[in-house]
Image (spheres, rainbow, N blue to C red):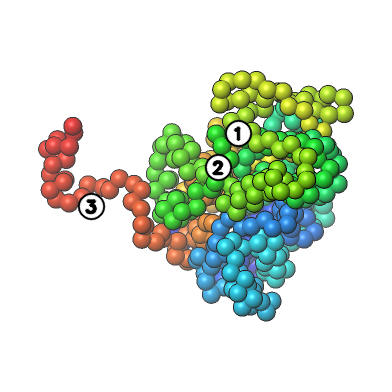
């Protein structure tokens, strides 16, 4: 069915699409919608300006995906909002190329995103959506000084910092999530520091602490994983960040999806090789080359069971999964590099009972990123960056955001405005159908020759 959109001539005519949250995902969608004038859209963000993970922007941090996987290039390479267009606009394309980066500085990509956010149409910053109501044939979005109405709604509020239950009572100046690391580490005067979390975020915190260890006597890095493992960044492994993998993944059963997600975890959540080398070499220098008294301990296969106050410090009860032992660790400060979880924004509370959630608390998504809810089909609820379990490991990364945005635009239009079909895959993920099998193989299969 083709959906017809008309210009908003009447004052009370609703938008075709409203977006809550302006992070990279909805920013990508806004960029693509500039080329679709028949869709009237507007995106709202409570912050006064675009700012991408400012608390994690430590010196030297790098992007873990190609700069070509930007807001638009994979589906609209001629867009004025590509990363290359940003470099050209700032007169530093050649300087960037000559720098020969193995990985793009995250600070550079953050500036690119902020540049786009200042120029693309339809963005409203400093607008906190307080409540969303569905009334008749539209959504009503209310904010402090007015309201907006829309036929369709897309959620792009991103993920929220995840804090384990054992740490929640102690959050403060000396116990915090790594999303606040940049501002807090600078003023952290703690002799004993424990970093919990063995992924890239934890590695970046450890790397920053080791850069100036003068105030530290002890640094302990805890990971639940068997080791401090590198990201699986090889050509075949990176095929999971492709439309053809997503289409194959969508056909799996719930249990098969869980298994596939587990098997591909290190394509996304591992440490970059540069971070591993930096930390190891710094520890080597502190131990053998510099007059340092720092006692650094890297502790994989550990799971924190309990945390409690011990005077002005903390005591952590830790289970060693390697040999089953129980350990007690002491810290003056604890940094939680414990990841992020998607959650629906509070503004959707009035719609909460109408939205179906999966066992992980994520909204149940259809293949086209629409949520399953009890409202009219003509009024779609869509979600960005919420399909880790339904669409695969890449959904929470930057890699496929342009392709996902293109899919959402096609869904709204009811036609293939953007070419979102997968490339010719290098890997055959799904079982070939019988019609695609060689004749002899089909005959053997039908005769039961392959049953053994």
In the picture of the structure, the residue carrying the numbered disc 3 is: 436
Based on the displayed image, in which of its 4 quarters is residue 359 positioned? Answer: top right
Relative vertical location of residue 389 with respect to residue 50 in this rendering, above or below: above
In the picture of the structure, the residue carrying the numbered disc 1 is: 300
Q: Is residue 110 left or right of 450 when viewed as pictured?
A: right
- Residue 436 appearing in the image: yes
Across and down, in percent, residue 157 comes to: 67, 50
In the picture of the structure, the residue carrying the numbered disc 2 is: 229
**What's the CA distance linking mark 3 and mark 1?**
46 Å
Q: Is residue 220 left or right of 450 when viewed as pictured?
A: right
Q: Is residue 385 left or right of 308 when viewed as pictured?
A: left
Across and down, in percent, residue 187 comes to: 86, 46
**Is tag 2's residue or tag 3's residue first in the polypeptide sequence?**
2
Q: State the residue in front, 223 or 215.
A: 215
Q: State the residue in front, 386 or 114.
A: 114
Residues packed near mark 2 inside 10 Å, few (<14), some (14 to 19) or many (20 plus)? some
Closer mark to the observer between disc 3 and disc 1: 1
Q: State the residue in front, 33 or 314.
A: 314
**What's the CA distance linking mark 2 and mark 3?**
39 Å
Q: State the residue in front, 369 or 203.
A: 203
Rendered residue at 53%/75% (across/down): 78
Instruction: Name the secondary structure under disc 2.
Output: loop
**What's the CA distance linking mark 2 and mark 1?**
10 Å
Instruction: Name the secondary structure under disc 1.
Output: loop
Label count reads 3
Residues packed near mark 1 inside 10 Å, few (<14), some (14 to 19) or many (20 plus)? many
Which quarter of the rendering shows the N terminus?
bottom left
């Amino acid at each position: 069915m083709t959906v017809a959109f008309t210009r908003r001539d009447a004052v009370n005519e609703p938008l075709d699409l409203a977006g809550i949250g302006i992070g990279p995902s909805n920013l990508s969608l806004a960029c693509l919608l500039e080329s679709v004038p028949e869709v009237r859209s507007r995106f709202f963000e409570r912050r006064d300006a675009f700012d991408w993970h400012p608390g994690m922007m430590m010196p030297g941090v790098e992007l873990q995906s190609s700069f070509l996987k930007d807001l638009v290039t994979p589906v609209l390479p001629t867009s004025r909002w590509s990363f290359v267009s940003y470099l050209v606009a700032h007169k530093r394309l050649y300087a960037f190329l000559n720098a020969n980066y193995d990985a793009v500085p995250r600070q550079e990509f953050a500036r690119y995103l902020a540049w786009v956010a200042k120029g693309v149409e339809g963005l409203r910053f400093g607008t906190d959506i307080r409540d969303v109501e569905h009334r008749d044939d539209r959504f009503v979005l209310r904010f402090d000084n007015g309201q907006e109405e829309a036929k369709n709604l897309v959620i792009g509020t991103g993920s929220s910092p995840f804090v384990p239950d054992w740490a929640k009572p102690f959050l403060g100046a000396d116990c915090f999530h790594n999303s606040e690391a940049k501002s807090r580490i600078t003023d952290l005067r703690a002799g004993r520091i424990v970093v919990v979390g063995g992924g890239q975020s934890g590695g970046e915190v450890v790397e920053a602490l080791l850069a100036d260890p003068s105030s530290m006597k002890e640094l302990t890095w805890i990971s639940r994983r068997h080791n401090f493992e590198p990201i699986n960044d090889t050509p075949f492994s990176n095929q999971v960040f492709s439309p053809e993998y997503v289409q194959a993944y969508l056909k799996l059963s719930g249990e098969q999806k869980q298994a596939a997600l587990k098997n591909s975890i290190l394509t996304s959540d591992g440490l970059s090789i540069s971070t591993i080398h930096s930390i190891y070499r710094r520890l080597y220098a502190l131990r053998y080359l510099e007059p340092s008294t720092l006692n650094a301990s890297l502790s994989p296969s550990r799971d924190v069971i309990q945390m409690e106050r011990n005077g002005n410090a903390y005591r952590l009860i830790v289970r060693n999964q390697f040999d089953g032992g129980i350990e007690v660790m002491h810290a003056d400060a604890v940094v939680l590099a414990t990841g992020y979880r998607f959650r629906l924004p509070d503004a959707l509370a009035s719609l909460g009972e109408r939205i179906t959630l999966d066992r992980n608390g994520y909204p149940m998504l259809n293949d086209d990123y629409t949520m399953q809810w009890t409202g009219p089909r003509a009024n779609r609820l869509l979600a960005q960056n919420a399909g880790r379990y339904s669409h695969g490991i890449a959904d929470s990364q930057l890699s496929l955001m342009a392709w996902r945005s293109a899919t959402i635009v096609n869904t709204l239009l009811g036609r293939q405005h953007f070419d979102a079909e997968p490339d010719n895959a290098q890997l055959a993920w799904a079982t070939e159908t019988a019609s695609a099998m060689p004749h002899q193989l089909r005959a053997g299969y039908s005769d039961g020759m392959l049953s053994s």
